[in-house]
Image: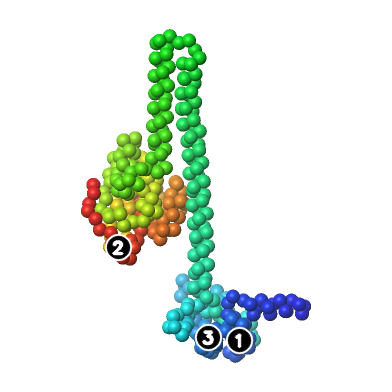
């Protein structure tokens, strides 16, 4: 028992949060960090106690119906900030928690909000990295399957034709026929390889920029699908980072492909516009759409857009999908410009 008490005392004193224990509004116990904060910021325990109790009383006295959950809380948290000698302030959370109501014993815990936010950001970045890693693995699987199912089969078919030419005694007409078949097969395989290369990384994006790359994409998909795809661009994209341009292109590609595969649209409009502080991409189709209330999963976490949503957030952008049944779907992405740059540009149609 004595050993357990020693462990508890050690944990109490080495806690990363400052802890104060009060009885009858008198400070009876505080850990090392709480004592350090009192000295460094010249804190008054009575002042902290008054702030916390005021927040607790406001919470208990709030009888609105929407605050029922708050009334059931066993502790209350209120933000506070302390100024250092260099006039810099540090943000904390002050947590008031009754320990024994009958004996009037309660605890105040001072948590470093800046540290909490840093830990939260680290955790968020870890999750984003995991999403991106999964997406990259799925992309590798797709490419591997395409190589096996399409490219490899085409090359194998051409090899069999060459073997016939080399090992069989063919008449001139048969030789011409087999040679033509091999040439047709190789041309088809070459076309598939070029298509895969465009899907993986279009050279026009590197050579000419985002808007020409989107227009080339729209032209190619329109030719393949027969669906009208319009591109309206009023944005100065040279100021965007390479990462942002890549994500905008990928979202445009994914959104158009999703519409063609699932929505049966007659027209798709891609609109890229500059605003004083951000650039916006909209991909709108007039397809079947869907009922948002019945498809909670379709919020960037389905149809290949989950990865895009996470990559947008990782670059401090915003991602949104809106849809109405039988009226179409709109995918909207916004990225902020750097504070010292503004996006203005001529209309490109």
In the rendered view, would you say 60 is above or below 249?
Answer: below
Q: Residue 110's x, y, as percent?
A: 55, 79
What is the distance, in whole Å, between disc 3 and disc 1 at their CAs? Answer: 21 Å
- Residue sitting nearer the eye, 88 or 349: 88
What is the distance, in whole Å, between disc 1 and disc 2 at their CAs? Answer: 53 Å
At label 2, counting other C-alpha atoms closer than 10 Å, the crowd grade (few under 14, some 14-19, many 20 or more) is few
Q: Residue at x 38, y 50 (%)?
A: 246
Q: Which label's residue is closer to the chain start, 1 or 2?
A: 1
Q: Residue at x 52, y 49 (%)?
A: 134
Q: Residue 122's x, y, as percent?
A: 51, 64
Q: Residue at x 59, y 81 (%)?
A: 33
Q: Residue at x 39, y 58 (%)?
A: 318
Q: Which residue is mark 3?
A: 40
At label 1, counting other C-alpha atoms closer than 10 Å, the crowd grade (few under 14, some 14-19, many 20 or more) is some
In the rendered view, would you say 205 is above or below 47?
Answer: above
Q: Which label's residue is closer to the chain start, 3 or 1?
A: 1
- Is disc 2 placed on a helix, strand or loop? loop
Q: Which label's residue is closer to the chain start, 2 or 3?
A: 3
At label 3, counting other C-alpha atoms closer than 10 Å, the crowd grade (few under 14, some 14-19, many 20 or more) is few
In the rendered view, would you say 99 is above or below 211?
Answer: below
Q: Residue 113's x, y, as percent?
A: 50, 74
In the figure, residue 176 lies in which quadrant?
top left
Q: Residue 203's x, y, as percent?
A: 36, 43
Q: Which mark is residue 22?
A: 1
């Amino acid at each position: 028992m004595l050993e357990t008490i020693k462990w508890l005392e050690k944990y109490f004193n080495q806690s990363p949060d400052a802890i104060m224990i009060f009885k009858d509004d008198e400070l009876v116990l505080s850990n090392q960090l709480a004592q350090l904060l009192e000295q460094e910021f010249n804190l008054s325990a009575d002042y902290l106690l008054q702030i916390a109790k005021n927040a607790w009383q406001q919470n208990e006295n709030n009888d609105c119906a929407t605050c029922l959950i708050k009334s059931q809380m066993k502790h209350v948290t209120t933000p506070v900030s302390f100024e250092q000698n260099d006039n810099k302030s540090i943000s904390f959370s002050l947590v008031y928690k009754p320990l024994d109501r009958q004996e009037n014993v309660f605890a105040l815990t001072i948590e470093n909000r800046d540290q909490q936010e840093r830990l939260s950001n680290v955790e968020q970045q870890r999750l984003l990295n995991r999403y991106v890693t999964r997406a990259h693995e799925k992309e590798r699987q797709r490419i591997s399957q395409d190589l096996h199912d399409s490219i490899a089969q085409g090359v194998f078919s051409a090899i069999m034709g060459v073997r016939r030419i080399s090992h069989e005694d063919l008449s001139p007409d048969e030789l011409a026929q087999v040679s033509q078949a091999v040439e047709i097969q190789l041309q088809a395989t070459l076309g598939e390889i070029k298509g895969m290369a465009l899907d993986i990384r279009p050279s026009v994006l590197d050579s000419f920029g985002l808007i020409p790359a989107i227009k080339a994409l729209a032209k190619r998909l329109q030719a393949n699908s027969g669906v009208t795809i319009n591109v309206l661009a009023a944005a100065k994209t040279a100021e965007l980072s390479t990462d942002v341009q890549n994500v905008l292109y990928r979202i445009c590609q994914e959104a158009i492909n999703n519409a063609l595969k699932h929505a049966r649209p007659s027209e798709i409009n891609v609109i890229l516009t500059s605003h004083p502080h951000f650039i916006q991409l909209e991909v709108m189709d007039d397809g079947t759409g869907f009922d948002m209330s019945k498809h909670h999963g379709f919020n960037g976490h389905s149809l290949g857009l989950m990865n895009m949503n996470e990559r947008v957030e990782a670059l401090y952008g915003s991602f949104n999908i809106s849809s109405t049944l039988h009226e179409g779907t709109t995918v909207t992405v916004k990225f902020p410009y750097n504070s010292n740059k503004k996006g203005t540009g001529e209309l490109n149609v």
